[in-house]
Image: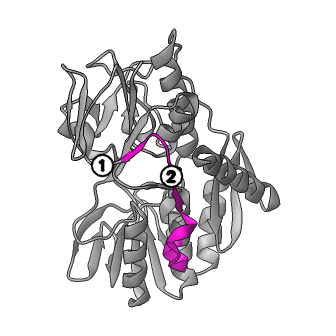
Amino acid sequence: MRTIIIGGGFAGLSAMKVNKSLLIDEKDYFTLTHKLVDVFKTGNPNLAKIPYREGNFLRARVREIDFRRNKVITEMGAFDYDKLLIAAGYSQKIFPNTLKIENIDDALNLRQRVMKSKKVTILGGGLLGVELASACKEMGKEVSLVEGQNKLLGFMTKESSQFALNKLSEIGVKVLLNQKVEGIENGKVKTNDYELESDVVISSVGFRGPSLVQEMGLTNVNGRMLVDDYLRSVDYENVYGAGDSATTKGFVPMSAQVAVQAGKTAMENMLREPRKFTYKQVAIIVKINGEYFGDLMGRFVRGKVAEMAEKIGITKAVMLVN
């Protein structure tokens, strides 16, 4: 059976561990997305970049997918498939007049801009926004963090949310909750209650599926291809989706851990009798000012336990490539 994987992120590489397929990606390295803030902080891209091993890897841009003829058409030629897995990661829709940190180039560009600035405003109090706020403060900047909800890290436990708020406030980050962004222009961020002067404004919100999904005309939710409980496309029975590229009607979170589980299940379902996809979030770890904390099996942890959970997660990710 000829199987093709589009995308070499967590889901795509997890699928490759199950079955050696032709993997097509625009870049020649795997990105540890949860290390992008470290790249931003240090300027060292190698912290998040792991070169692909030689093998069934093709560096190319997908121009078209002919679903009727079962062909993936790239700038390097056309390739036939029996089963196709789309695992092309995510993209980010940002506010006008803001910067993003979607990939390594973004992280390096953002570092240059922030280094020259004094006042930084970050939009979004999720995991990325919280860690960026800490990093910018460690770089000696005046930092404001704007969040639309009434707490930070809304998807985590109350203990993690409160700890993040206390820790950021302690190091001098101005945390503004229940704030809706009404406009960004002339170096000012206007919310329902504040007007913040800013040299740099960073969007840590707006995550959605990759542009490829919509370009190929696939049924999608927020740019993520819609799949059934077996991770099979609702449009084509021999096309599957995994990771941030795909979601079910019941919703699948955008998470590295979930992507790894989805990639494995998707490829197994492509090869044999399919089984329903279920996922488990084992750990969500955050770092503020060098201190690790977060949720482990749904319970708040901090310090050495949280740091160990983070390191184990990174080690498992690296093993996908090796």
Position of 178 relative to 248 (above/below)? below
187 displayed left or right of 243: left
Which of the pair 223/239 is nearer the observer? 239
From the image, which quarter does the N terminus lie in? Answer: top left
User: Whole-Å distance between the Cαs marked 1 and 2?
Assistant: 14 Å
Please tell me how crowded label 2 is: few (under 14), some (14-19), or many (20+) other residues with Cα within 10 Å. Answer: some
Q: Amino acid at mark 1?
A: Ala
Q: Residue at x 55, y 29 (%)?
A: 264
Q: Nearer the viewer, residue 87 or 155?
A: 87
Quadrant of the image occupied by residue 299: top right
Q: Residue furthest top?
A: 273
Image location of residue 321, percent across then percent down: 57, 48
Q: The magenta stretch spans which residues?
A: 39-58
Q: Nearer the viewer, residue 302 or 232?
A: 232
Q: Is residue 66 above or below residue 255?
A: above
Residue under the point 71% across and 68% down: 291
Tag 2: amino acid = Tyr
Residue under the image location 71 percent in, 56 percent down: 311
Image side of residue 37 versus residue 122, left or right:
right
- Pointer 1 with pointer 2, Cβ within 8 A: no
Would residue 48 be counted in the magenta stretch?
yes
Image location of residue 156, percent across then percent down? 59, 47
Q: From the viewer's perspective, is 103 left or right of 55?
A: left
From the viewer's perspective, is residue 96 above or below residue 127? Answer: below
Q: Is residue 97 left or right of residue 179?
A: left
Is any part of residue 173 visible from this angle?
Answer: no
> Where does residue 31 sit, x and y in percent of width and height?
49, 56
Q: In the image, which disc is placed on residue 60?
A: 1
- The percent coordinates of residue 177 (x first, y second) are 45, 63
Q: Splitting the image into 4 quarters, where does residue 56 fall? A: top left
Disc on res. 52: 2
